[in-house]
Amino acid sequence: MLHTRTTPSQRRRALRERLAESRLLTMPGALNPLSARLIQDTGFEAAYLSGAVLAADLGLPDIGLTTSTEIAARAQQTARVTDLPVLVDADTGFGEPMNAARTVQLMEDAGLAGLHLEDQVNPKRCGHLDGKAVVPREEMTRRVRAAVDARRDPDFLLTARTDARAVEGLAAAIDRAKAYVDAGADAVFPEALADEAEFEAFRKAVPVPLLANMTEFGKGPLLDARALENLGYDIALYPVTLLRLAMGAVEDGLRTLAADGTQAALLPRMQTRSRLYELLGYADYTAFDSAVHDFTLPPGT
């Protein structure tokens, strides 16, 4: 009721322990706090917060317009309502290495289990668009070292993302990943790999947990969980899946409402009132104060 039953340190430790297993960890991207509750309720073991989704939620493109405090505030709202460890996209750290250091502490304070920092320049862009640019390897290693130095909880997962595959080629991206690990990164996120052979090459070369981004309409293949597990990957991200599903349904619903003048045809596609109340935990609030929930739901809602 009101908040999660676990502490941030417990969730961070749970993520570390889960990554020590040889099973793929699938992380759907939450589009708001309520969807994070639903991710937990449907049996997933972790959730993700995509920078692209958080920007889109504000009506902004994913080009570095959001700030560290905006992301931390939204992330705190999400971490507060789920017992799952939550990993957040921290873009480039929102500035220089000192900004990356501050970002780590903001995300720790928000209750997150970890973050990833990328080696793009500012302003950044979606990892699956053309025209990306990356900072020199030495500059990114300074970001990583600053993040490591700023971390207060050693269980907080620091992941280095490299976008170099599309800019400098696979070999350079692997070399960068190794340098980031040497600088203290706990895990690596190779963005926009082209095919299974490249996923395999990264796995053979980099001896830390690896993240695979299974975003739709991107440059890489949509590999299923079994394929990723066989390739030796540790985390599969589905960053924008729920946002795309939700916005597609909203757009279709608006068109139906405009055309029909009623939402009646949409009722079978809606989450019911009773399911929403179940997800929100009305019964727990009732147990605390019977005046909160002193009504009866109409049949079939």
Image: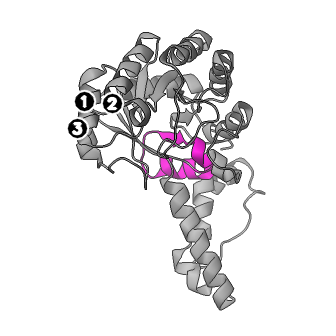
Question: Which of pointers 1 and 2 lies earlier in the amino acid sequence?
Answer: 2
Task: Confirm whether residue 20 shows in the render.
Answer: no
Q: Amino acid at mark 3?
A: Ala
Q: In whole angstroms, how far apart are the C-alphas of marks 3 and 1?
A: 6 Å
Residue 201 numbered tag: 1
The residue to which callout 3 is attached is 197
User: Residue 115, how many percent across, how many down?
Assistant: 54, 29
Kind of residue sitting beneath label 1? Ala
- Identify which residue is drawn at 50% across, 25% down: 12
Give me the C-alpha separation between circle 2 and circle 3. 11 Å
Crowd rating for badge 1 (residues with CA inside 10 Å; few <14, some 14–19, many 20+): some
Q: Quadrant of the N terminus?
A: top right
User: Relative to 300, does residue 44 appear above or below in the rendering?
Assistant: above
Check disc 3: other Cα within 10 Å, few if <14, some if 14-19, many if 20+: few
Q: Are marks 1 and 2 in contact (CB under 8 Å)?
A: yes
Distance CA(mark 1)–CA(mark 2): 9 Å
Q: Residue tagged by mark 2?
A: 170
Which numbered disc, 2 or 3, marks the residue that appears first in the sequence? 2
Query: How many other residues sit within 10 Å of disc 2, few (<14), some (14-19) or many (≥20)?
Result: some
In which image quadrant can residue 117 be found?
top right
